[in-house]
Image (cartoon, rainbow, N blue to C red):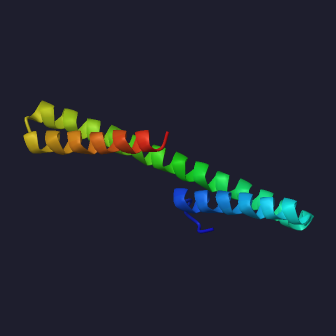
Amino acid sequence: MSNQPSKASGQYHSVKGTVVETIGNLAGAPSWVDSGKKEHAEGEGEYRAAQAKGYAEGTADRVEGKWDSVAGAITGDKAQQASGNIQQGKGEAQQKANQ
């Protein structure tokens, strides 16, 4: 696994671990069962870590966007306000994708 958590990599390792565990059960190979359980757990952990990271990044975008939008509204800078609204929307979407 890489240093940065990835949802895709986490799902891959979770599924692969389940497959290895199942093969181990069918073949009566305890080492495969243990290896599969370990890989599955690591994959689930990586997926959850990537999800938390994505949610946190979405929160940061949402807050920064809101700040820019309000600052633009106060100063009358329509471009800053629009840019802030876009960034805030991006942050909201990222949060929803990582709930």
Could you say where residue 17 lies in the image, as x and y percent from the top left?
Answer: 72, 61
14 or 57, which is in the foreground? Answer: 14
In terms of image quadrants, where is residue 3?
Answer: bottom right
52 or 19, which is in the foreground? Answer: 19
Q: In this picture, is 50 found above or below 88?
A: below
State left or right for residue 29 relative to residue 48.
right
State left or right for residue 61 relative to residue 71.
right
Residue at point 84%, 66% (across, down): 32
In terms of image quadrants, where is residue 78?
Answer: top left
In terms of image quadrants, where is residue 27?
Answer: bottom right
55 or 10, which is in the foreground? Answer: 10
67 or 95, which is in the foreground? Answer: 95
Residue at point 13%, 32% (across, down): 73
State left or right for residue 92 relative to residue 45.
left
Which quarter of the rendering shows the N terminus? Answer: bottom right
State left or right for residue 7 relative to residue 35.
left
Residue at point 39%, 45% (across, down): 94
Q: How many marks?
A: 0
Could you say where residue 63 lies in the image, as x and y percent from the top left?
Answer: 34, 38
Q: In this picture, is 39 found above or below 87?
A: below
Could you say where residue 13 lies in the image, as x and y percent from the top left?
Answer: 65, 62
Q: In this picture, is 54 found above or below 28?
A: above
Could you say where residue 89 lies in the image, as x and y percent from the top left?
Answer: 28, 40
